[in-house]
Image (cartoon, rainbow, N blue to C red):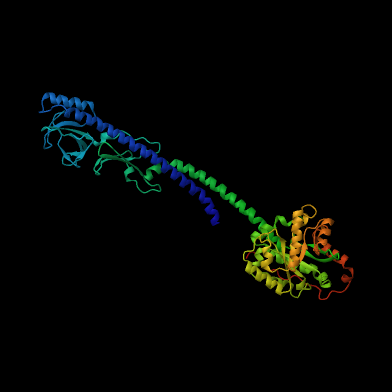
Amino acid sequence: MLIGIALAAIPIIGINVLLGANLITGAQREVDYVANEVLSLSESRLDDAATALIGVGLKTVGECSRSVVDLLQKAEQRASFIAEIALVDKSGAAICAADGQPRVVRRTSPEHDTLNPNVTLATVSIGELGASQLVRLTWDADGPISVRVLIPGERLFPHFLKSQLTAAFIAQLATVDGTPVARRSLVEDVAEERSSRLPSVVSTAASQRYPFKVDIEVPGSALLRANAGLFFYANIGGGVFAIVVAVGVYLFCRRMGGPVREIADGIRDGEFVPYYQPVIDITTGKLAGCEVLVRWRRRNGAMIPPGRFIALAEASGEIFPMTLALMEAARDELADAYARLPQLKVGFNLFAGHFDDSDIVDDVQRIFEGSPIRMNQLMFEVTERQPLNDIPRARLVIAKLQALGVRVALDDVGTGHGGLSYLLKLGVDVMKMDKMFVDAVGTDRYSIAIVDSMVKLANDMNLELIAEGVESFEQLEYLRAKGVRMAQGYVFAPPLPGAMFLQLVAAMNPEAMKKPAKGAGSYGVGPLRMMSAR
């Protein structure tokens, strides 16, 4: 359930995170653009004001005559956003202005230099309360009279700030020392918004000609509100996608869990049955025993080959109870015949997980101890479909099995994960030649050389060699000529169900099957220890 909730939430969270990240990235570009636009407009208006100021300052201005007032009025007309242009004395007191009585101002910031050495910039306020903030540009001439221009800070802003994302900007113009010149919030309550799932987007643009900067901020809450519709529809889409993902995962898990449950149910209901492939002594033609293979016989009579379920059984851990069920079924089915014919052997396949601990040793002892099938009639094959996790531990498990009297074989020698190194490290009794090498007899001289090498290796290591997958008389004659004694394959018989294998046993050993079996009797199946995983 928790996994399902997490899988359903991940698409929604991911969409919100991606959308928020894209929105912040886009908003940053927009805010940077707006900051530079405001800076450009402010510099342009200051340039116009400075031009008017310098134009008056360069003329010889003495006293506030009529001609001087006309000059000030013409300069003010050229820059209509100027609040005032006036003459001031050395103490800073205004003498006269274009519009009559000059304003009384109080400086609120230090005096800053500009690119023109004769022009300085400072912020001033009108009256004692300082309700209005203005920018003052001053032309400081060598004479007793200077010229000043007053510009309301608000007039340095554009009438509106335009953006594709939101109009909720907080814009501020300030001098480089931090003194505010003007501040504007285009949405009334935007300045009060701070807490939000999205961070605020901030940009600063500093002038290279004048000592001021422009700060633009968009609170995350305003950005989120302005794009609420986008998030709404994105979350609807994310929710639909999450539902599709959750349903897909559910169906996938159900499909994956279904076969595993079917395997577990099949083990409990006895649907996994042993098939027996005869092993023949090709030097005498006598039956030497069999290898037990598993088949899945469904209740509807369908027979499922092992290639369709063995890998899943191993991956899910159901191979453990399946192997136990197979050994118990073979024990009960072969008990009478093997009690009469003690020379017959029966082999079972184990996979890598069986050698991780000693439980398999206890299972073999529990299943076969006291059984008509003797321990020395058993052989267990180490398959190499998966590599052994711990070679020393596997060697210990094999030694314990051998201590019971059973033999251990290495299956598919030369083709699996371990290769020939397993022969040296595991201490097995039997090696089985894979069908791949037997198939090459008569067709591939290099593979024949490998077959010859394997025969010699088995002789040198004093191991019994069993050839698998013998399908032609040519292969049979070659192997016999090379000294191979045991073989199995379709040239003799395919894997047979229990009844047919017992018929084969009786046909090849008619006299022995007529004698009473020692210790056979009835032998019921003991309780199956279900092991879902190790």
Q: Residue at x 89, y 68 (%)?
A: 510
Q: Describe residue 461's horizontal placement relative to residue 517 as left or right.
A: left
- Residue 72 drawn at (x, y percent): 17, 27
Q: Is residue 208 left or right of residue 251?
A: left
Q: Quadrant of residue 41?
A: top left
Q: Is residue 519 left or right of residue 237?
A: right
Residue for point 44% across, 45% down: 21
Q: Is residue 513 visible?
A: yes
Q: Is residue 448 above or below residue 187?
A: below
User: Compared to 9, does 163 lie above or below?
Assistant: above
Task: Report which quarter residue 88 is drawn in.
Answer: top left
Q: Quarter holding the N terminus? A: bottom right
Looking at this view, is 404 or 410 the one in front?
Answer: 410
The reply to whether residue 292 is in sight is no
Which quarter of the image is occupied by the C terminus? bottom right
Residue 500 coordinates in the image, percent (x, y): 83, 62
**Up/down of 438 relative to 524, above or below:** above
Of 364 and 134, which appears nearest the observer? 364
Q: How far across and down, in percent of the image, does residue 455 sit?
A: 76, 63
Give how far across and how far down residue 463 sits, in percent.
75, 68
Q: How many marks?
A: 0
